Amino acid sequence: MTSRRNFLQQVGLATAATSLLSSAKTPMTFIHHVLFWAKNPGNDAEKAQLLAALKQLGTLPMIQSAHVGRPIVTEFDKGATDGSYTFSVVLVFENATKESEYLYHPLHKKFIDDNKHLWGKVQVIDSELI
Amino acid sequence: MTSRRNFLQQVGLATAATSLLSSAKTPMTFIHHVLFWAKNPGNDAEKAQLLAALKQLGTLPMIQSAHVGRPIVTEFDKGATDGSYTFSVVLVFENATKESEYLYHPLHKKFIDDNKHLWGKVQVIDSELI
């Protein structure tokens, strides 16, 4: 019985591991992509403040995955790539409701109030899985 | 010894499960975002062909996560959102090398050759985690 119980425990853990593995490969259902152009691209202190605030924002719990990145322009796609932005923020949500929770969250509004003087332009691209 | 061995096996599986869980929450390191504007937005057959080809492309093995989506414009961000595109493709890679493998893969080149007559404009935004 001990060995049978251990076997079942191991199967249970292996099943949990498989389930986690497949969840990691699940298509991203709702994506909120925001490009920020710094108001003063030569001002490193301002860019550092904005970057820190964006990273902090990405830790809000209704966000499934977050990315704050810098522009990359590849040789392959250089003719079609916009690499002019300062920061790229990609947030993945389970659905539109979770994105809405994020957009109307007090800390998102506070982020905008505290940092909007740091960007000259923002572009949003939202998309929902087909 | 049997129970000790079983214990160690279980710890191993539990560790694997924990590792998978944290990998699912790992920030996305390299993002390749491509927006496609259909050449003939009123032609449903052409759009269906492009959509099917994009979804197929997203299954290539060096891609960590893939998303093919339609535009969403929220009330909150409507002043800053570009919802004019037809399809949004977001691919996540572990690093720039994996993206390069994808870009130069024969099936990516075949996708372009077979479908480039279906889009009027493409915009690429690549970003690497800071």
Image: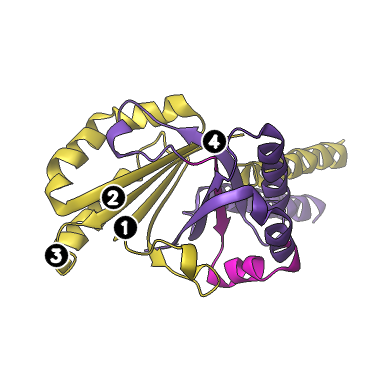
Chain colours: A yellow, B purple
**Of the two numbered discs 4 and 2 in the rendering, the one whose residue sits closer to the viewer:** 4
Vertical placement of residue B39 versus B12, above or below: above
Which kind of residue does numbered mark 3 sit on? Ala
- Which corner quadrant holds the C terminus of chain A? top right
Q: Position of residue B128 (x, y in %)?
A: 43, 64
What segment carries the magenta color? Answer: B85-107
Q: CA distance from mark 1 to mark 3?
A: 14 Å
SS at circle 4:
strand
Which percent across, then down, holds residue A32?
A: 42, 40
Q: Type of residue at label 4?
A: Arg
Q: Are marks 1 and 2 on the same chain?
A: yes
Query: Which residue shows up at 72% across the image and 48% down it?
Result: B53
Q: Which mark is residue A54?
A: 2
User: Which residue corresponds to mark 1?
Assistant: A87
Does label 1 or label 2 sit earlier along the sequence?
2
Q: Which residue is mark 4?
A: B70
**Disc 3 marks which residue?**
A45
Give the Cα separation between the discs numbered 1 and 2: 9 Å
